[in-house]
Amino acid sequence: VIVDSVIKSAEKYDVDEKLVMAIAQTESTYYRDAVSCSNYKGLMQTGDILAEEAGYTPQQLFEPAVSIDVGTSYIDEKLEEFGDTRLALTAYNQGAGTVYSGNYSTEYADLALARMLAMEHFLVENGYINVYN
C-alpha cells in the first residue's frame, strides 16, 4: 500500500519514486504514526501548515497516502526551487532559509541519496518498476 501511494504521488508530481521512498525511510523509517519533537507528522514528517495548504487536516498526516502526497508535493517544490537534489533534500530537512543562508549540513541529503540508490533494487525485485522501459 505504501509503495502504491509513493508511485501514485511520484507520478502526480513527476518526482522519482525512489527519492520519495528514501525520504520516508530517512524521516520515519516508514512509521505512519511518527511525530517529531517539532511536531512534524507521519511517514514524510511534514507539518500542519503544509497539510492545510494541500487541503488536508493535520491529523490526516498519519494516513500514509496523505503524508506521501504532502511530502512529495513539498520535495517537488524544493527541487524546482533549488534545481539540485542534494540542496532540495537539505531544504526539505532543514528549511529553505537554512540553505539560502549557507549554514547547513548535507548529512541528511547524503543519507537520503544513498537510500535512494538502494530503493531501485527493492522496486525492481518486487515488480513495482521495470528497468527495461
Image (cartoon, helix red, strand yellow):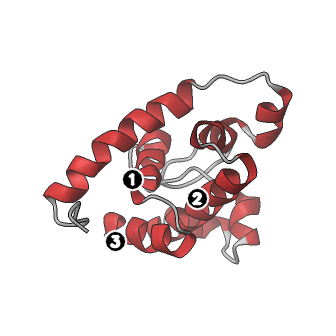
In front here: 96 or 82? Answer: 82
Q: Nearer the viewer, mark 1 or mark 3?
A: 1
Return the residue at label 3: 4
Q: CA distance from mark 1 to mark 3?
A: 12 Å
In front here: 106 or 1? Answer: 106
Structural crowding at the residue carrying mark 2, measured as other residues with C-alpha within 10 Å and reported as few (<14), some (14–19) or many (≥20): many
Structural crowding at the residue carrying mark 1, measured as other residues with C-alpha within 10 Å and reported as few (<14), some (14–19) or many (≥20): many
Q: Position of residue 66 (x, y in %)?
A: 53, 70
Question: CB atoms at circles 1 and 3 under 8 Å apart?
Answer: no
Disc 2 is placed on an element classified as helix
> Left or right: 94 with respect to 109?
right
* Image vertical order of residue 47 relative to residue 29, above or below: below
Q: CA distance from mark 1 to mark 2?
A: 13 Å
In front here: 105 or 56? Answer: 105
* Image vertical order of residue 107 relative to residue 81, above or below: above
Q: Amino acid at mark 1?
A: Lys
> Left or right: 124 with respect to 97?
left
> Left or right: 96 with respect to 92?
right
What residue sits 74% from the left and 40% below the top?
95
